[in-house]
Image (cartoon, helix red, strand yellow):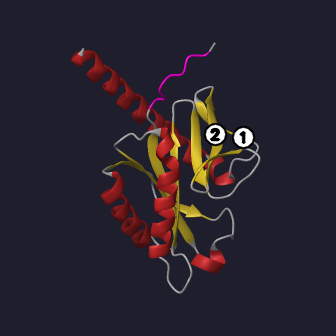
Amino acid sequence: MSIPQDPKPAKLFMSVIADSAGNIAQVLSRLTKRYGILDFVSALLAFDYTDYYYAEMGQPLVRRFASFEDLIPQEGLAQIKVQTNLLETEQSAGGNRRVNIDPGYLLAERLVLASGKNYAHRIYLSSGIYADLTMVYRDRDYRPLAWTYPDYAEPKVRTWLRGLREKYLLQLRGKEQTVENTE
């Protein structure tokens, strides 16, 4: 028999894609007002894996990943995606998005993205949002799965994710020590 246990908190991160570093900075500033301090930010990366966003957002596009200091309950991901969708709409011009914001969370063993689109490997959460198991951690790296977006499988992104994982594990150890000290 399995005994239910509370899940560990997750490391919230966002991928922000836009036509300029300035637009990304503006969105990250807005996100910090809701989710707190940024604690791990990637370099600005070219986003040229697909032309999917070009008609709506223009080109060339750039991306930045950023994580937040405070850990979140895993079940909060759906509501976070709903909120980032609203922010995308607020930032739109002429009916076109100027930014694409993809929230996700990282755990020691996996990486999960939020999506509004159903698919075979996505599990429904709530509010029209699905959890997309994007990568699993095995053999000291986040490993892409058959459906992982090609850009997430890139070495630069995986290097950033490994660094984020180290930060997350340090945070978890700190929380455990805090709990031990209060007992």
- Which stretch appears magenta? 2-8
In the picture, the disc for residue 89 is none
**Any magenta on residue 6?**
yes
Q: Earlier in the sequence, mark 1 or mark 2?
A: 2
User: Mark 1 sits on what residue?
Assistant: 145
Q: Given the current orientation, which residue lies at the most extreme bottom position?
A: 94
Q: Amino acid at mark 2?
A: Met
Q: Residue at x 57, y 30 (%)?
A: 109
Q: Main secondary structure of the magenta part?
A: loop
170 left or right of 44?
left
**Could you say where residue 119 lies in the image, as x and y percent from the top left?**
74, 51
Q: CA distance from mark 1 to mark 2?
A: 6 Å
Q: Amino acid at mark 1?
A: Leu
Task: Say which quadrant the N terminus sits in.
Answer: top right
In the picture, the disc for residue 135 is 2
Q: Is residue 113 above or below residue 2?
A: below
Q: Residue at x 51, y 59 (%)?
A: 82
**Could you say where residue 178 lies in the image, as x and y percent from the top left?**
27, 23
Q: Residue at x 63, y 72 (%)?
A: 53
Helix, strand or loop status at disc 1: loop
